[in-house]
Image (cartoon, rainbow, N blue to C red):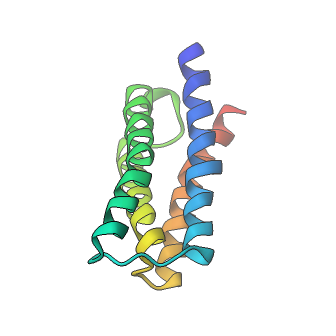
């Protein structure tokens, strides 16, 4: 039960902090230059804890997949899409339509998990 509560807290954090920060950064943030060494190092430093948290979320989700409302492939896709979104939010290298498709997909899967628990 404690494991499930911790996982739900992590899921909420991924949705409410990481996902929303990605959207905000994409819409209002500075566009970083991939070829600029300083920009690259800043992005690397800022994203490392985000990638670690997403990795942790995926591991915990896979460990309790039989208790949550999404399938293993949805968990993997959510993790992959979140990682892609983080990079796109810094580099602004996709059209808004594609970014929003990723956002909606991730939000849908996270909401499935969160709403199933309520």
Q: Position of residue 55 (x, y in %)?
A: 37, 40
Q: Position of residue 36 (x, y in %)?
A: 30, 75
Quarter of the C terminus within the rendering:
top right
Q: Is residue 62 left or right of residue 115?
A: left
Q: Image height check: is 24 above or below 70?
A: below
Q: Of all residues shown, which one is farthest toward the right?
A: 118
What residue is at 64 percent from the left and 40 percent from the top? 114
Q: Is residue 12 left or right of residue 102?
A: right
Residue toward you, 40 or 88? 40
Counting the numbered discs, the total is 0
Quarter of the N terminus within the rendering:
top right
Q: Position of residue 100 (x, y in %)?
A: 55, 74
- Judge whether residue 113 can be spotted in this image: no
Residue toward you, 11 or 70? 11
Q: Image height check: is 4 above or below 62?
A: above
What residue is at 42 percent from the left and 82 percent from the top? 94
Instruction: Give the image quarter of residue 19.
Output: bottom right
What residue is at 57 percent from the left and 24 percent from the top? 6
Residue toward you, 57 or 116? 57
Q: Image height check: is 74 above or below 2?
A: below
Q: Image height check: is 63 above or below 33?
A: above
Q: Of all residues shown, which one is farthest toward the front?
A: 38
- Judge whether residue 18 can be spotted in this image: yes
Q: Position of residue 37 (x, y in %)?
A: 27, 69
Residue toward you, 114 or 55? 55
């Amino acid at each position: 039960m404690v494991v499930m509560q911790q996982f739900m807290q992590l899921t909420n954090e991924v949705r409410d902090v990481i996902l929303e920060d990605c959207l905000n950064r994409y819409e209002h943030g500075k566009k970083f230059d991939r070829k600029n060494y300083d920009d690259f190092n800043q992005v690397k430093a800022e994203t490392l804890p985000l990638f670690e948290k997403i990795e942790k979320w995926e591991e915990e989700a896979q460990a309790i997949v039989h208790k949550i409302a999404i399938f293993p492939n949805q968990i993997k896709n959510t993790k992959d899409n979140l990682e892609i979104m983080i990079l796109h939010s810094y580099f602004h290298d996709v059209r808004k339509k594609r970014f929003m498709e990723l956002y909606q997909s991730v939000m849908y899967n996270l909401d499935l998990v969160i709403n199933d628990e309520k």
